[in-house]
Amino acid sequence: MKKPETQAQLYVVGNLNVDLIMSTLDQWPQKGTEAMLESSSLRPGGSAGNCALALAALDTPHRLVANQGNDQFTPWLAEMFSTSAAQWPQYACETSLTFGVTHPDHERTFFSNQGHIVRLSMEDVLQQLPQVARPGDWVLLCGTFLCTALFTQYPALLAELKNRGYQVAVDTGWPPQDWSDALREQISPWLPYCDALLLNEVESLGLSGCDSLPAAAEKLLSEMAANANCIIKCGPDGAHCWSDETHLYVTAEAIEVVDTIGAGDSFNAGYLSALVYGLDTATALHWGIRVASAAISSSPRQYPDWQTLFAQSSSATSREVH
C-alpha cells in the first residue's frame, strides 16, 4: 500500500519529561523502610512526549514543540526526538522527571518535580511554528496545567495560533489544584479558539461543571468555535464525539491491559493523525481507540503502523446517537 500524501502537519505543544515507572506496589511501605518492586522502565513521557512517540511510530508528519533543561537527561531526550530537538530552547535547570508506581489494579501514583516544563513560554512555542499554517495543519496543546508559565499565556497563544491559520486541539489534563469555579472562568475565554477538545470523562465533567457527559458536551460546545468537536475518551467503553449536528460513539474491543500510562495521549495521536490525512471524524475516533488499545496492551509499548490503520478504515463502523 502506498502511503497517502498530505501537506498538513501536526504540532504537539506541551510537557516532555522523563518517566521512571516502577511496578507493582501492593501497599505503601512504612517510613524509613525499603521496598523491592518487580520491574522498572525509564522512558520519555509527559502528555506531549507520549503523543509524539505514537506519532513517530505511525509515521504521521509532526513536530514536538517543547523546551529542555541542561542536565544528564537532556541529550538523551533530544536523541529520542531528533527531528524536533534542534529547535528546543534550553534552560539552566534540571530536566522535568516523573516517578510513578503502578498498583495491582493498574492504577498508578505519580510524583513529579518542576524542572524545565514550567519554563516553557509562548515565545518558545511560537518561534518553533511557521508564521502561516498550511491547509490542514493542527496544533495540539497538552499538559496544560503542568506548563505553568505557558498556562498564563494561553489566551494570547490561542489567539495567535488562530491568527496564523492553525486548527487547534486542546487536552487540558487534570489540574493539580482540582477544578473550581474560578478555574473554569479562567479557561472559558479559551474555548472560542478551540476546534477540538480531547478530554476524558472526569476532565469533561470537571471543566464543564456538569454531572453527565451529554450535558458536559453541550455546555462546552456552546462556548467553542463554529464546527468544533468535543471528544470524550471513555477508556474501555470507547469514545464519543459531539458536534453541533451529530453525536458519534465508537466502542472499544476488550483487551488485556498491561500499562495504562499515556492511553489518552496515544488516543490523541491516532485521532489527530486521521485528521491530518483528511479523514472523517468517525474514522478518527476508530484510529484513536486502536492506537490507544495497542499502546496499553503491550510491553514494550507498540503501536499499529499506518498501513494497518488505513486498511482497517474501510471496515470501521461507528454509531450515530440521537
Image: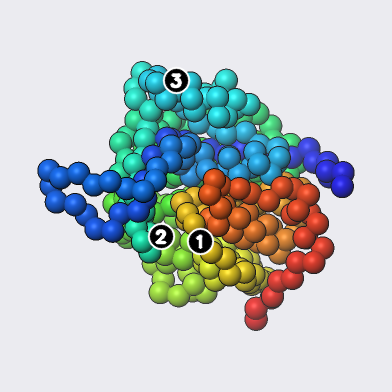
Q: Nearer the viewer, mark 3 or mark 2?
A: 2
Instruction: Identify which residue is drawn at 46% across, 51% down.
Output: 261
Residue carrying label 1: 257
Q: Secondary structure at mark 1?
A: loop
Amino acid type of the residue tagged 3 in the rendering: Gln
**Is the residue under label 2 in contact with that under label 1 (CB below 8 Å)?**
yes
Nearer to us in this view, 199 or 196? 199
Specify few, some or many for label 2: CA neighbours under 10 Å numbering under 14, 14-19, or 20 or more.
some
- Eyeballing the image, is 216 above or below 313? below
**Residue that lies at the very extreme toward the right in this rendered image:** 2
At x 68%, y 51%, the residue is 304
Provide the residue designation for mark 2. 106
The quadrant of the image that shows the C terminus is: bottom right
- Residue type at mark 1 is Val
From what the image shows, is residue 89 above or below residue 51?
Answer: above
Q: Is residue 319 left or right of residue 143?
A: right
Q: CA distance from mark 3 to mark 2?
A: 35 Å
The disc at residue 90 is 3
The quarter of the picture where residue 99 lies is top left
Mark 1 vs 2, N-terminal side:
2
Pick whichever, 12 or 287, lies toward us: 287
Cα separation, mark 1 vs mark 2, equals: 8 Å
Pick the residue in front: 23 or 100: 23
Can residue 80 be seen here? The reply is: yes
Label whose residue precedes the other's in the sequence (3 or 1): 3
Image coords of residue 98 (percent x, y): 36, 40
Q: Quadrant of residue 121?
A: top left
SS for callout 2? loop
Number of other residues with Cα within 10 Å of mark 1, as a class: few under 14, some 14 to 19, many 20 or more: some
Q: Of the two numbered discs 3 and 2 on the same chain, state the one appearing first in sequence.
A: 3
- Can residue 137 be seen here? The reply is no
